[in-house]
Image (cartoon, rainbow, N blue to C red):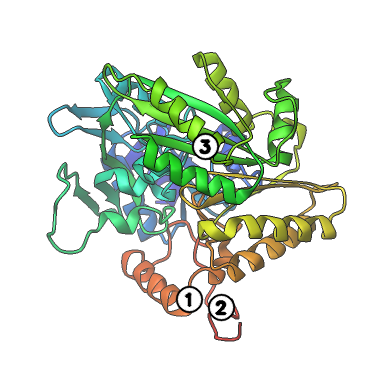
Amino acid sequence: MTLIKELKSALGEETVLTGDRIGGRYRSDESHTGRELPLAVLRPATVEAVSKALSICDRHRQSIVPQGGLTGLAGGANPRTTDIALSLERLSGVEEIDSAAATMTVYAGTPLEVAQRAAEEAGFLLPIDLGSRGSCQIGGNIATNAGGIRVIRHGVTRDNVLGLEAVIADGTVLCSLSKVLKNNTGYDLRQLFIGSEGTLGIVTRAVLKLKPLPTSRSTALCALGSYDNAVALLRMAQVMLANVSAFEVMWESYFRFNADLLGLKFFEADFPFTVIVEEDLFGGEQGTERFETFLGAALEAGLIEDALIAQSEKEARNFWAVREGSAIDKALPSLFNFDISMPIGGIGDFVEECGAALLARFPGAHVSFFGHIGDSNLHIIVATADGSEEDLHATDKITYDLVRRYSGSISAEHGVGTLKRDYLGHSRNPEELAVMRRIKAALDPNGILNPGKVLPPATVLPSPRARGEG
């Protein structure tokens, strides 16, 4: 029996898509770098079906590329023509909300926004929050260890996963759907799969932490004159505001460009930096006076030049619309996105050096910066004249060479995939890469799970710094 026939026999015709039944969307994630349709697409609706699919593919030495909401920007879900894509879109739904434990058990294919709404209806907050919440899936959030805008208060996805179920390459289901915070019973296997981008196993279910649901939020848009002042404002906010939930910094070029696209005007003048500060409020808590006291102290200390407090949800949404930059994709269709991190104190100097280097290489290009900052995460937008692959490689080298020099990470929250794979040695040393390969070989000895992703080929030399040359 051929592989495809065996899969159809075991899973059902409706689960196995081939030929004209494979839609173009299975070609690529949001990086738009995928060029090929897979050999087939599997759409299992149960954990048992995922297990059967992997067992059969492992026996046939057939490569599998897991796919979630396809919102990634690193090429991690892109298949080749010889791969089978395994989409988790039908493995969806909230299995349970445990109010006593303050947990949610959810299937991997559940869209993040669906899980968020279910938590809210039960009176809780699901702390994981991303701009792509409407289309990204819980399994993909876990597989990439996604960050987002609430990390400063609630941590990255890894910090919000209590229990996990994953299927490894031979079809074995590892089920540890624990609801307890303290669990010192040997190796913490869930951490192997969080951030592994489907190279060690496919996440099928998870137990997520829930937090108290804020009853309201105070949101301010602040104009600043320097990066040092932005860092000082962050530290002041952490002291004076009880529940800072977001601190987003936008450099002038990013803020002005997006505000103009949206037809929004907030301040009479342009300022080098604009910051969104947000605080969660609970119960009958009145945070307006505290928020105003904080902003007044920041003005008196010379940290901010001007500030606006949102007087309605609409005004707060306008602040966030500029930060989320949804209009920039249409305005700059060939843009390159970079997602990096480094020690907070070095980010200001990095931006100046990186911006100058990119504009020297590509005069007239759009180059802008924004980031969460409070969790050391910086995003870079680059749009060259033609957006060619050659331009992408050149911007990669300029950016990641500087990241290495500033002792940063080439990926803060979007994963490694294929687009950052060959630069992994800029952030991880040869010993770490060797152990990663040993773990991969132990859990996936036939190399069927998302081959070519995350780990660079062993022949790719580590970075000069890692070899002691830098």
Residue identifier under label 2: 462
Q: Nearer the viewer, mark 3 or mark 1?
A: 3
Circle 1 sits on which residue?
A: 429
Residue 158 disc label: none
- Residue 328 position, x and y percent, is 70, 33
Q: How many numbered marks are there?
A: 3
The residue located at (81%, 48%) in the rendering is: 384
Report how far apart the C-alphas of labels 2 and 1 lie in the structure.
7 Å
Crowding around mark 3 (Cα neighbors within 10 Å: few <14, some 14 to 19, many 20+) is many
Q: Above or below — where is 78 with respect to 119? A: below
In this picture, residue 10 sits left or right of residue 235: left
Q: Residue at 39% x, 46% y: name it.
A: 156
Q: Which residue is label 3 attached to?
A: 298
Residue type highlighted by circle 1 = Asn
Q: Earlier in the sequence, mark 2 or mark 1?
A: 1
Residue sitting nearer the eye, 275 or 335: 275
Hey, which quadrant is residue 122 in on the image? top left
Classify mark 1: helix, strand or loop: loop
Give yes or no for contact between labels 2 and 1 (Cβ–Cβ under 8 Å).
yes
The label nearer to you, 2 versus 3, is: 3
